[in-house]
């Protein structure tokens, strides 16, 4: 029996199907080719998570909304303090999560704190061969000094910096400067001027009838 010639309409339809299949595969395997930036996984303190297995490093990306101004940062923070890091230790908790306990000396209490030595618990850290790295958190070492804008305690007992990296300002006591690294650039400001602005924003918030 003679072979039947396929119509141009058939070939056009087959070509369209092949194109759609190719685009779907690219979208899954190489979304950047289409200009698509896949959203990062969101880490929500208190929700179900598993600890990394032995010899494993887990990178946790946090969806941190942009905080536009220092005034808004002061408003959103449950606690604002200038601290010196006295010690840090990572703990593998009974629920399998890793947290880091920071022992800090509160140098300047700015909001909901007092001069004291206290502990601040944050997610992430390294215990033996297990490590959890929280993207958006700068390296914190003993002896470092920071001005921190912190959330209230979550169900895990953690205080998160407001806006993650946005709420952590490194203090250079020698140069009397405050610095914050955001999106590939470093913002530097005079320490006394920055502290005065924070105190002014907090005072305005306290004086507000809706504050």
Image: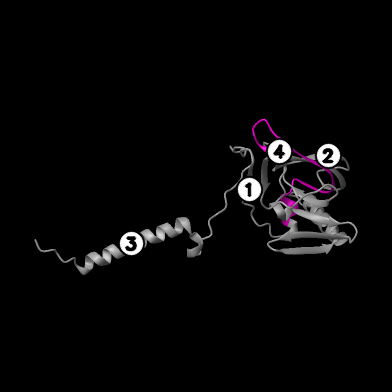
User: Is residue 122 rendered magenta in the image?
Assistant: no
Nearest to N terminus: mark 4 or mark 1: 1
Residue 97 drawn above or below residue 82: above
Residue 193 drawn above or below residue 97: below
Pointer 2 residue: 118
How far apart in space, not on screen, are marks 3 and 4 (Cα)?
Answer: 50 Å
Nearest to N terminus: mark 4 or mark 2: 2
Nearest to N terminus: mark 2 or mark 1: 1
Q: Position of residue 32 (x, y in %)?
A: 51, 62
Q: Which residue is drawn at 19% across and 67% down?
A: 7
The stretch of residues the image draws in magenta is 72-99
* Element at label 1: strand
Q: Nearer the viewer, residue 187 or 5?
A: 5
Nearest to N terminus: mark 2 or mark 3: 3
- Mark 2: few, some, or many residues within 10 Å (few <14, many ≥20)? few
How far apart in space, not on screen, are marks 4 and 1 (Cα)?
Answer: 16 Å
How far apart in space, not on screen, are marks 2 and 3 (Cα)?
Answer: 62 Å
Nearest to N terminus: mark 1 or mark 3: 3
Q: Which residue is drawn at 30% across and 65% down?
A: 15
Pointer 1 residue: 59
């Amino acid at each position: 029996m003679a072979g039947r010639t396929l119509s141009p309409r058939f070939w056009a339809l087959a070509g369209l199907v092949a194109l759609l299949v190719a685009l779907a595969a690219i979208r899954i395997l190489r979304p950047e080719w289409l200009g698509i930036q896949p959203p990062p996984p969101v880490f929500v303190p208190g929700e179900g998570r598993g600890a990394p297995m032995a010899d494993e490093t887990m990178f946790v990306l946090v969806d941190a909304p942009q905080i536009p101004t220092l005034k808004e940062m002061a408003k959103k923070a449950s606690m604002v303090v200038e601290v010196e890091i006295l010690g840090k230790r990572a703990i593998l908790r009974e629920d399998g999560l890793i947290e880091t306990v920071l022992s800090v000396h509160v140098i300047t209490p700015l909001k909901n704190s007092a001069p004291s030595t206290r502990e601040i618990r944050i997610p992430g850290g390294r215990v033996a061969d297990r490590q959890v790295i929280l993207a958006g958190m700068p390296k914190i070492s003993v002896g470092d000094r920071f001005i921190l804008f912190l959330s209230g305690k979550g169900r895990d007992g953690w205080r998160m910096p407001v806006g993650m990296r946005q709420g952590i300002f490194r203090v250079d006591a020698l140069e009397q400067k405050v610095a914050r690294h955001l999106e590939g650039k470093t913002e530097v400001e005079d320490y006394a001027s920055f502290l005065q602005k924070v105190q002014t924003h907090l005072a305005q918030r306290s004086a507000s009838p809706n504050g």
